[in-house]
Image: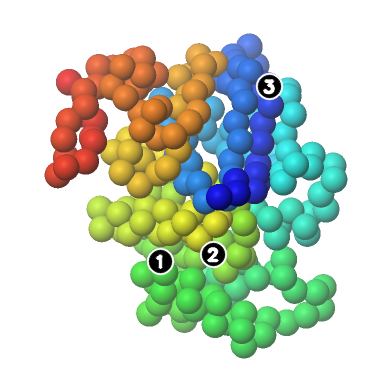
Amino acid sequence: MTAEASLFSARGLRLAVGARTLVEALDWEVRAGEFWCVLGPNGAGKTTLLKRAAAVSAPGTCQGALAWQGRERSAWTRDALALLRAYLPQHSADAFDASVLETVLLGRHPHLGRWQWESRNDGALALNALAQVDMAGHARRGVRSLSAGERQRVAIAALLAQEPRLYLFDEPLSHQDLPHQAALAHLFARLAADRHAVIAALHDINIAARHASHALLLDGRGGACAGPVDAILNADRLSKAFGAELAQVDLAGRRGFIAV
């Protein structure tokens, strides 16, 4: 079996904000077919790291080599990069009360010419994306009428409509109830299985342990470790990273972790 293509890589990555080092000397490669969870305590640098991996502006300094499909940022046009990766920030603001469908159709813009309108196929892709996040019946609603969890799922649908190879989600489960947390985690795993790559910053260690294939664990002091989820997520390493004692337990036949 041939190795899947590398979609993002970092070599010798150092991230710092002011006098504080968030990440030191990180080597990290993300390939198609992988679902990466990024875990760590508050302020450890998860958002900063995701922004750098998405090639968007981030605070602080960045040293080291970053590459997308083996090419550094200067080799990519903005349009080409938008076809490769899609990024969901923690928060989004709606200046106008566009419809849910219109909002999701924004994800199709990288595929359209400057004066080109969305086609019937674009509309079908947007509706399918809404169905995947349990928002199929809300296409005509205004986005400003939605709850925080519903609005977040609409934002995820817009990324699905964008059809990138690499998805980057910053806290995509934060406003979701338990059924939607599980459904979205399953969705991310399916995207990875379909030869995409997914990077998601999460707070729920047990969702990461159950659904992700790989984990990147930040300790908030510059340390980071990356690899297959079963190798990275263990009680000793998690306890040291979070500064609290965690124990591994059996949750319906699966590994889980609880604070003790």
Of the residues tagged 3 and 2, which is closer to the observer? 3
Q: Residues within 10 Å of mark 2 (few under 14, many from 20)?
A: many
Q: Residues within 10 Å of mark 1 (few under 14, many from 20)?
A: many
Q: CA distance from mark 3 to mark 2?
A: 31 Å
- SS assignment at label 3: strand
Which amino acid, by three-letter code, is at mark 2? Leu
Q: Which residue is mark 2?
A: 160
**Residue 56 visible from this viewpoint:** no
In the figure, residue 102 lies in which quadrant?
bottom right
Which amino acid, by three-letter code, is at mark 1? Val
Which residue is nearer to you in this view: 257 or 41? 257
Which residue is nearer to you in this view: 6 or 156? 6
Which amino acid, by three-letter code, is at mark 3? Gly
Q: Which residue is mark 1?
A: 133
Name the residue rendered at 65%, 53% in the picture.
Answer: 85
Q: Which image quarter holds the C terminus?
A: top left
The percent coordinates of residue 41 (x first, y second) are: 41, 25
Q: Residue furthest front?
A: 1
- Does 156 appear above or below 32? below
Say if mark 3 contacts mark 1, CB within 8 Å. no
Q: Residue furthest top?
A: 19
* Residue 65 relative to residue 154: left or right: right
- SS assignment at label 1: loop
Name the residue rendered at 36%, 15% in the picture.
Answer: 240
- SS assignment at label 2: helix
- Does 234 appear above or below 49? above
* First along the sequence among labels 3 and 2: 3
Q: CA distance from mark 1 to mark 2?
A: 10 Å
The percent coordinates of residue 116 (x first, y second) are: 78, 80
